[in-house]
Image (cartoon, grey):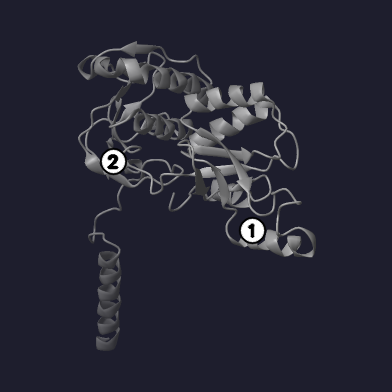
């Protein structure tokens, strides 16, 4: 009997130790799943659960722009409102200008002037309560905050109270479209831009010397990309896509040079927007898009 009691005590002690190691207190239930936000892509930097009422979407919800920021933020707010309507399959909410103190439950408030220096040029803070409040230092940051909201409300129109702080690790987050493979219609480009923006990717590259796009089509795509905070960048992949008459990889060495180019990560050289050439890390679409599909399935992209 004594041995049996000792064994039971040992097992109980081990069980308590395991509970404590998991960060829980004996006798207390684990943290409620309602305290966690739905997963978003890329994963959020910081989420702090809060107390009090959370957020619930209503048919009367509005996108509210801070009056001091209306001149620079209203266009982004209208794009966001249109995307909200599409995401929720409802009429787009109205975009209004008003102070945060006049918001109503269900509203989404966008404002600039954040003093949080860690957010940088593309970061944002999102406060989840009866209203959703996005604060950023720049229009880009506020826009990326709206992409997080889109991902959240598509999964659940009821969100727990808390605060998000989020910012990207890399300034350039690019996808390269291989226009050498085929001609893509305008509708495809517009959908691609929406998808990139949804994932907070901010640059769309295409082969300048292999594209069949006309000048008019390029201008339309560029204008559409600007509304989604995506930069359209023509690039030349070197040495694989250089003029064979001038490329040292022409002839028997061409295949080896293409393998080197792939091993180097598909680095493209393209216009950086300041008149000089710049190196860009990228993902070649559609040829090398498998990792994005995998990330969609796993619901997470790390390190972006």
Q: Residues within 10 Å of mark 2 (few under 14, many from 20)?
A: many
Q: Residue at x 35, y 20 (%)?
A: 73
Left or right: 296 with respect to 18?
right
Q: CA distance from mark 2 to mark 1?
A: 34 Å
* Image coords of residue 178 (percent x, y): 68, 43
Q: Nearer the viewer, residue 51 or 91?
A: 91
Is residue 246 shown above or below 200?
below
Quarter of the picture holding the N terminus: bottom left
Q: Residue at x 53, y 28 (%)?
A: 225
Q: Residue at x 69, y 26 (%)?
A: 214
The residue where tag 1 is placed is 262
Which-is-in-front pick, marks 2 and 1? 1
Left or right: 247 with respect to 49?
right
Q: Secondary structure at mark 2?
A: helix
The residue where tag 2 is placed is 119
* Image coords of residue 194 (percent x, y): 54, 30
């Amino acid at each position: 009997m004594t041995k049996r009691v000792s064994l039971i005590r040992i097992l109980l002690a081990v069980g308590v130790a395991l509970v404590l190691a998991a960060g829980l207190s004996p006798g207390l239930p684990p943290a409620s799943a309602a305290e966690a936000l739905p997963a978003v892509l890329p994963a959020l930097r910081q989420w702090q659960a809060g107390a009090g009422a959370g957020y619930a979407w209503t048919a009367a919800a509005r996108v509210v722009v801070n009056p001091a920021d209306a001149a620079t933020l209203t266009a982004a707010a209208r794009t966001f409102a249109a995307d909200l309507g599409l995401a929720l399959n409802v009429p787009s909410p109205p975009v209004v200008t008003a102070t945060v103190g006049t918001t109503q439950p269900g509203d989404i408030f966008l404002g600039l002037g954040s003093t949080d220096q860690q957010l940088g040029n593309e970061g944002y803070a999102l406060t989840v309560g009866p209203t959703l409040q996005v604060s950023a230092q720049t229009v880009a940051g506020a826009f990326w905050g709206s992409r997080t909201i889109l991902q959240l409300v598509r999964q659940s129109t009821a969100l727990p109270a808390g605060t998000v702080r989020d910012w990207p690790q890399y300034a350039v987050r690019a996808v390269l479209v291989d226009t050498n493979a085929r001609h893509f219609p305008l509708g495809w480009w517009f959908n691609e831009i929406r998808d990139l923006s949804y994932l907070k990717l901010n640059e769309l590259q295409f082969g300048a010397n292999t594209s069949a796009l006309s000048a008019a089509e390029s201008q339309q795509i560029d204008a559409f990309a600007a509304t989604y905070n995506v930069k359209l960048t023509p690039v030349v992949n070197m040495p694989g896509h250089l003029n064979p008459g001038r490329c040292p990889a022409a002839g028997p060495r061409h295949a080896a040079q293409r393998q080197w180019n792939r091993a180097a990560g598909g680095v493209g050289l393209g216009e950086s927007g300041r008149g000089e050439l710049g190196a860009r890390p990228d993902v070649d679409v559609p040829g090398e898009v498998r990792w994005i599909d995998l990330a969609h399935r796993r619901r997470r992209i790390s390190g972006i």
